[in-house]
Image (cartoon, rainbow, N blue to C red):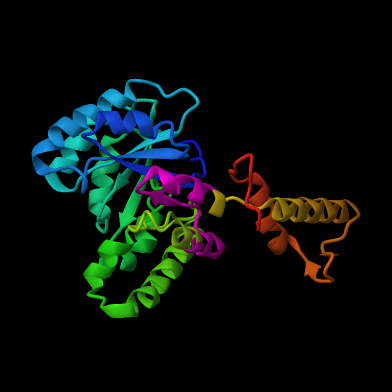
Amino acid sequence: MTAAPLLRSFLYVPGDRADRISKALDAGADAILIDLEDSVALSAKEAARHVAVDCLSSPSGDGPAVWVRINTGEIGRADAAALATGDPCLGGVVLPKCDDPDWLDEIASMIPSSIALSPLIESALGIRRLDVLCAHPRVTQCHLGEIDLLADLGAHGDAGPQLLGHAYAELLYASAATGILPPIGGVYPAFRDLEGFAADSTRLAYLGFAGRPALHPSQVPVINAAFSPSADELATAAALVASYDEALARGQGVVTDNKGRMVDEAVVRRSRQLLAGPRDKETRTK
C-alpha cells in the first residue's frame, strides 16, 4: 500500500448522525472519524453502517480524510464487509479494543490493501502485544484509548498519569521500532477545558505523538496548533538542515549549531521531520 499521510486531528462523529458528518467535514480537522462503535446504540448499528457507506460515496474533494471506526465481533465483521468495496474516499479503518493479531488478520483480509488499518490499543493485553500488532504488514499507525486502558488496569485516584506514561513509552518504542507512523493519543473528555486540553496536547506532541482525536469541533484548532511546529522551530530546523547539508557537501559529517552544540545526522533527522510534517498556515506562536 502507499505511504499513509501524517494526520494530526481526527474528529469523531457518530455514524448514525448524517447531519453531524456533513458539518464535521468543514471543521478543519485533518480527518473525520465516523464512529460505528461506542457512540452508536446497538439498535442503530446497521443504520449507522449505511450512513457511513453513503458518506464515502460522496467525495469530499479537498476536505479532510474520512476514516471509520468499526465494531468488534460479528458486528465488526459486518462493518468490514460493508467497507470492503475499497471506496477511494475511505482513508483508513480504526479497530477498537484490538489486542488479537488473528482479528487484525481477519479484518485485513476483508479490507483492500489500499486502505490503512489502525489498531486502537485499549487494554493491558494490547500493550503487551504491541510489537506484534505494530509489525503487522497492514498497520500504518496505532491509536491509544486511554480511558478504556485505565479501566482495564483498575487505576484509582491520581495513578492514571503514571500508568499512561508507561503506555506512551511502550507505544512510541513499538511504533518507531517497526517503522510505522508515530501514534495517535487519546481523547480528552472535558472538551470545554480548552486550556487544559492545549497543555495536554502539547505534552503529547513533545513526547513524539503525531496527533490525537477530537470529541468536539472546538478541540480541532487546538490539536492542529499543538502538533504543528512554531515559526521559530521551522526557521531553526531549516537553518540546521541547510548547514548540515552544506557540511556534507564539503565532506564533513558533523556541524556546530548556533548554541555551540555538535550536530550529526541523528539530530538533523528531527529537523527534517518538522519540515516534512503537516502544519497550518498559522503555526504555533511558542
- Which x, y percent locates residue 102? 23, 52
Residue positioned most to the left? 43
In the image, taking residue 256 as reference, residue 67 lies left or right, namely left
153 is higher (above) or lower (below) than 121 = below
- Which x, y percent locates residue 265? 73, 60
Q: Is residue 140 visible?
A: no
Residue 207 shown in magenta: yes
In the image, taking residue 226 as reference, residue 148 lies left or right, namely left
Q: Is residue 234 visible?
A: yes
- Which region shows up in magenta? 199-224
**Magenta stretch: dominant SS?**
helix
In the image, taking residue 63 as reference, residue 70 lies left or right, namely left
- Which x, y percent locates residue 149? 28, 66
Question: Which residue is at a point 32% across and 57% down the rendered structure image?
Answer: 189
Q: Foreground residue, 94 or 175?
A: 94
Residue 272 shown in magenta: no
**Quarter residue 129 falls in:** bottom left
Question: Which residue is at a point 39% across and 77% down the rendered structure image?
Answer: 162
Question: Which residue is at a point 38% across and 54% down the rendered structure image?
Answer: 192
Q: Foreground residue, 252 or 55?
A: 55
Quarter of the image with the C terminus is bottom right
